[in-house]
Image (cartoon, rainbow, N blue to C red):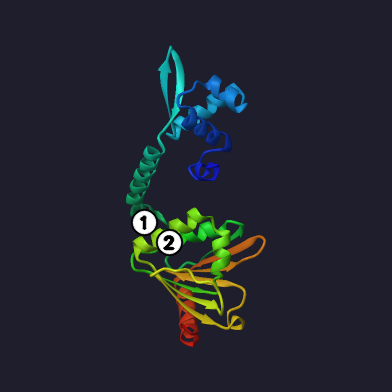
Amino acid sequence: MFEKELAELGLTDNESKIYLLLLQEGTLNPSDIAKKLGLHRGYVYDALERMQEKEVVSSILQQHKKHYQAINPKQLAEQLRFRLDHFEQAVPDLLKLSSASSEETTIELHKGRRVYRTLIKDITTSLEKNSEVLLIGIDERTLVEEIEPIYMKQYLTRVKELKIYERIIVPNGTMRLKSANFVYRHLDPSYIGNTAQIIYGESVALFIMGNPHYLMVIHNKKTADTYRKQFELLWKCAMP
């Protein structure tokens, strides 16, 4: 439980187990941690040092022996927000270091069950307030079943915060998510095909659901503008 969330913070499986144990037990020394988790004591010492560097545990002296305790999750969340805010301040200067021309085309290909994470992160980090996302052929029911609730909630929250609006063309009879930021229209499935298209900013994503999923993201303004024109033609033909 919670291993996936802790892995997102950069913790290994065993580091996650140590953190959760310290949350439950309070303060423990490395020997007690090793016994309770069945890990080699030397490994536990090394893991605790790494976890201190990651600032997810702290140490105290009790009876001249080093003991460890987990950083409170709320405090940990605040630390992560502070780091993110600090990094975002540096983003404009970091972008200036990029040698890529705005007209250069870059193409990314992703494969796996969780490629949607890459897409969600790219959309929410690359768009500004009041931006628009255009989608064709998205199967909302499949997305709801595939995407972990925490990621769907984060995306919907971010969309609301940034006032990002989506216009979505779906096949007839497809499930629709309820959101004031989403506007749906529908078409006969034969006009849509089996590849979802997501157009946002200066990028186009082609999403092929299967086992595994495939995601191709094209970063190029002219390409994105071309796909937008095609979307507008379909939008005029689609029914509310």
Q: Earlier in the sequence, mark 1 or mark 2?
A: 1
Residue 157 is situated, as x and y percent measured from the top left of the image, at 40, 59
Residue at the disc numbered 1:
96
Quadrant that contains the N terminus: top right
The quadrant holding residue 132 is bottom left
Residue 195 is situated, as x and y percent measured from the top left of the image, at 60, 72
The numbered mark at residue 156 is 2
SS class of the residue under badge 1? helix
Residue 16 is situated, as x and y percent measured from the top left of the image, at 53, 36
Q: Is residue 84 left or right of residue 226?
A: left
Asked if residue 56 is positioned above or below residue 84 in the image, the reply reads above
Q: Which residue is drawn at 50% across and 45% down?
A: 5
SS class of the residue under badge 2? helix
**Closer to us: 213 or 222:** 213
Is any part of residue 108 visible from this angle?
no
**Closer to us: 110 or 145:** 145
Q: Which amino acid does label 1 sit on?
A: Lys
Disc 2 crowd, CA 10 A, few/some/many (<14, 14-19, 20+): some
The quadrant holding residue 109 is bottom right
Asked if residue 76 is positioned above or below residue 178 in the image, the reply reads above
Q: Residue at x 55, y 19 (%)?
A: 31
Q: Which residue lies furthest to the bottom in this view?
A: 237
**Closer to us: 43 or 64:** 64
